[in-house]
Image: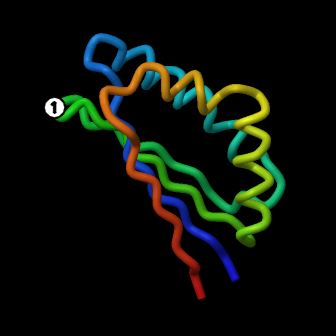
Amino acid sequence: MKEAVFAVVYPDIGTFDAHVEAVLAMVPDTRSFPGCIEAHVGINRDRFEIAVFHLWETPEHLNRYLDWRAERGDLDARSATMRREQDFRTFSVP
C-alpha cells in the first residue's frame, strides 16, 4: 500500500527565505530516492508556511528516506530555524 506524507513547516520569519531555498533544494534528491512516486512543495509567504507533500510506494520506502534524511542532519538543520514544530502526518493510500 502506498504512503502519503503531508507536512506543514513553520520557519522563523527572519529565516523564511533561506528555509524555502533549503527545502526546495531537497526536492530533487527526494524525487530520486528509491520508492518516491512524487514530491511537491507549496509556499505561503503571507503565513510564512511551507507545505510538503510526498507519495511513496510503501511505508518502508518512506521510513528509509526519513532515516537517510536524519542521518545526514537535514531534519535537524531545518528544525533549528522553526518558530514552532511542524505538522507531520502520514496516510495509507489504497
Number of marks present in the image shown: 1
Residue 48, percent from left and from top: 25, 30
**In the picture provided, is 54 more to the left or to the right than 65?**
left
Q: Is residue 13 above or below residue 67?
A: above
| Residue at image location 43% in from the left, 25% down from the top | 20
**Residue 24 coordinates in the image, percent (x, y):** 53, 30
Residue ranking furthest to the left: 46
- Give the answer, above or below, for where 2 lies relative to 20: below
**In what element is the residue under mark 1?**
loop
Taking the image as shown, residue 7 lies to the left or right of residue 26, namely left
In percent of the image, x 38 and y 26: which residue is there? 82
The residue sitting at the bottom extreme is 94
Which image quarter holds the N terminus? bottom right
Residue at 31% across, 27% down:
83
Q: How is the image coloured?
A: rainbow
- For disc 1, the marked residue is 46
- Judging depth in this view, the residue of 78 and 26 nearest the camera is 78
Provide residue 18's location: percent of width, then percent of height. 44, 14
Q: Which image quadrant for residue 30?
A: top right
Q: Which amino acid type is marked by label 1?
A: Asp
Rendered residue at 65%/28% (across/down) = 74
Residue 72: name its quadrant: top right
- Location of the C terminus (image quadrant): bottom right
Single out the residue that lies furthest toward the right: 34
Classed neighbour count for the residue bearing mark 1: other residues with Cα under 10 Å, few (<14), some (14–19), many (≥20) = few
